[in-house]
Image (tube, rainbow, N blue to C red):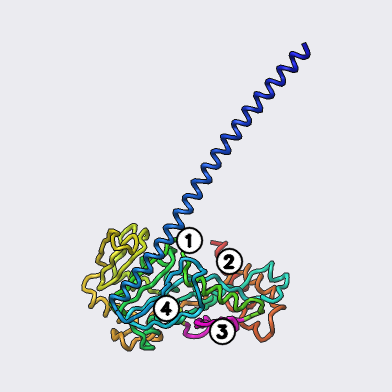
Amino acid sequence: MKNELLSDKVINSMSNNNSSSNNNNSNSNNNNKERNELVKQKEMHIEEAIVQRRTMQAFIKFVAASSDPNQKLPDSIIADTLDQVETEEIKECMGKVLLMFEDFGSNFGLPLFGHEAPSVDYYNSKLSLYCFIQADVTHGTNHVIFYDERGQGKGTDALCSLRMRFHLNQLKQEKRCDVAIVVCDNCTSQNKSNAVMKFYCWLSMTLYKRVVLLFLISGHSHMHADRIVSWMKAATRGMNLFTPNEIVEECNKVKGVKSVFLDHRSQPNEFFIGFEPVLDQYILDMPSGFTKYHYFDFTNGNVTVKENCISESPECTFELCVNPSVIAKRMTQTFFGSNNIETIRMADLKLQNTPMMKLSVKKVESILKKMEMVPLESISYYPTADGDGTVEENKNEETKMKEK
């Protein structure tokens, strides 16, 4: 009897084990299937990004050859891999086509302890130094603009200010081109807003005859601006730097990099607000769903959009303003008080300067804990507990907000 009971238990146990084994095999097969699907999706995305980069590169060369047959561009405009980048220096390739890459790089933190970082630096906040890169391939210069988080954010007004500054400087330095090709990443909020599109429409009616915006697929973009940031990070590695000017000095030692710091404390500063109302007054909104496209071609008040820059890709053209020559003069008059494109300068811009942005109480108090490690000659740059729009003023503002 005992043997029979033991035999039944053994059979039941074997049956349960077989059932469990089958379930495990089934789960394993499902997991492998899911994994294979994910790998396939990733490979498709990478291939799509590679195809886009190669197609975009061919398109850029085609536009340059059509506009200026004598203009020579680098063999590798958008590298397939980072290993293809042979040098940090962009060779000048002057012509009628301005080719540039734009993007925000990763922030620099102040104070920057690259040699020996004290524990207080690890546990407390840094003052953020924003970094906007405009890589001008045509003229062989990587322009880098640093500005403090207290100067302006990364929204529409900041981008319009920075972009207008660059293009007016090109005009001032007699580096005017007929066509501008701008390659950006696919960040919708920063680069694909209605205001940004209208700004480039205005550029195509004033400073250029044609502006082409090309957006790289998110991820695996091999964006030229990212490489510039890595060069600058390498140049400042192992150093203790405490002010923006010290960072600018080190970054300017990198070949092909020309960096500047826009000081929010200077009066008047170089940041402006109020671009959007002027742009909205004269130029129509883009059609709904336009952010899905990666190709925008602005000319004479119209925009042509396509999924990508492949010639076979279906395209649509939209009218953004009627009578562009008149509208362009009116907009320029509104912006600068003059419609003479040849004489306008950034200093003539009639928009309001951006008031200094205030840091939160918590962040200021956190930054102040590091001041013992900052040299005396550099401390004046940092926020103080009794001014500079910091602790006392912010406490009052936060108290008012809570009362509301």
Q: Is residue 258 magenta?
A: yes
Q: Secondary structure at mark 4?
A: loop
Specify the amino acid type for callout 4.
Val
Label 2 or label 1, whichever comes before in sequence order: 1
The label nearer to you, 2 versus 4, is: 4
The label nearer to you, 2 versus 1, is: 1
Q: Which residues are magenta?
A: 243-269
The residue that label 1 is drawn on is 219
* Residue 386 percent across, percent down from the top left: 64, 78
> Neighbour class for label 4 at 10 Å: few (<14), some, many (≥20)?
many
Specify the amino acid type for callout 3.
Lys
* Residue 323 percent across, percent down from the top left: 21, 73
**x 49%, y 79%: residue:** 144
Q: Quadrant of residue 249?
A: bottom right
**x 71%, y 70%: residue:** 120
The residue that label 2 is drawn on is 398
Judge left or right: residue 301 versus residue 262: left
The residue that label 3 is drawn on is 253
* Residue 181 percent across, percent down from the top left: 36, 73
Label 2 or label 4, whichever comes before in sequence order: 4
